[in-house]
Amino acid sequence: MSEATYRSLCDLIFRHSRIYLGANRQSMLVSRLNSRRQHLGIKSWDAYYEHLSKNQKGEELGILIDLIATNHTQFFRENLHFDRLKSEIIDTILKECGGAATKFLAWSAASSSGEEPFSLAITIKEHFSQRPGPPSDWMVYASDISRKTLKVAEAAIYPSSNLNLPNPEWLRRYFKRGSGPYEGKCRVKPEILKHVKFQQINLFQKSYPLPQPLHLIFCRNVLIYFEQESQAQLVARLHSMLTRGGFLIVGHSDSLNCFRHDFTPLGGGVYRRNT
Ligand SMILES: C[S@@+](CC[C@H](N)C(=O)[O-])C[C@H]1O[C@@H](n2cnc3c(N)ncnc32)[C@H](O)[C@@H]1O
């Protein structure tokens, strides 16, 4: 792949997803895209770029993003966030954010294959079932740019070995063990599934098809793939999606330190909307 083609591909990826590859990622791009190019019977990288740019909104660009995006995730990843939801954040929202006690709305904004929104849903369900009084309604919206990961999320079937849950009881409570061809796998139970809605959303698309205002947004381990200006734009949009006093939670490797924003940092990647 020539330097010029590499730059054109990076540009295309950036315009579509804001994923910023920068210099020195050429060999990564070649290794991730090579088999796709060969599968298409396209001989050169220039011709592959031509093929993509003729059909910029098309399926091929989606496949390219699927191939280059890092989708790593796991149940209860960065578990401190879920502990803080349980011990303080959910109750603060219910007390201080209008409407939350009637319908609590959360969004997992880069949900990958579903482990994060299902962890969030289990945490909310557990918390609500232990509160006195009538049960509150709640919903977790979950989205990602990658269709491939969303398919896994919608199937909601995971290898049992990946289900490292903080409370082993939850395995029986919230997952159904598979048998036959599904031996060694578990499916999320309907009582959780009915509270989680997946859809494809590019965080940089014009508008988000979500109810507003939201009370809680998880946007973890995705900001790091964007450059600073895109991060600042995205964080401002997330701010506008939240109710006053709503919470934004980012990953431990993400940072909001390098640009201005209107959140109060509460430590450990937890931020609260000010105004
Ligand atoms: C490393 S995973 C993080 C998953 C989960 N939030 C976690 O922390 O475990 C990053 C996800 O961001 C998604 N992503 C990258 N660019 C995106 C964009 N522009 N819009 C929406 N999702 C995007 C990728 O497809 C990937 O699934």
Image: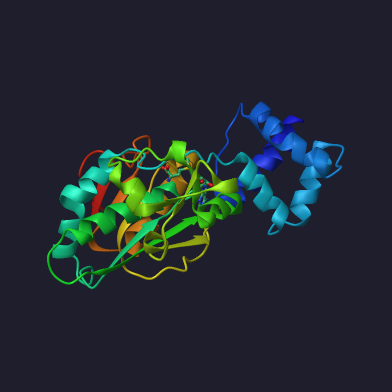
Q: Residue 214: x, y in percent?
A: 32, 64
- Left or right of residue 86, residue 269 in this image: right
Q: Which of 62 and 162 is in front in this view?
A: 162
- Left or right of residue 191, residue 95 in this image: left
Tally the marks. Answer: 0
Check the image and report above or below for 106 versus 14.
below
- Left or right of residue 261, residue 52 in this image: right
Residue in the image at 67% along x and 27% along y: 27
- Left or right of residue 177, residue 51 in this image: right
Residue in the image at 68% along x and 59% along y: 57
Residue in the image at 53% along x and 43% along y: 183
Residue 202 shows in this picture: no
Residue 222 shows in this picture: yes
Q: Residue 31: x, y in percent?
A: 69, 30
Q: Residue 138: x, y in percent?
A: 30, 66
Q: Quarter holding the C terminus? A: bottom left
Q: Which of 7 and 62 is in front in this view?
A: 62
Residue 107 appears in which quarter of the rendering? bottom left
Residue in the image at 34% along x and 56% along y: 121
Q: Residue 52: x, y in percent?
A: 75, 50
Q: Quarter holding the N terminus? A: top right
Q: Which colour scheme is used?
A: rainbow
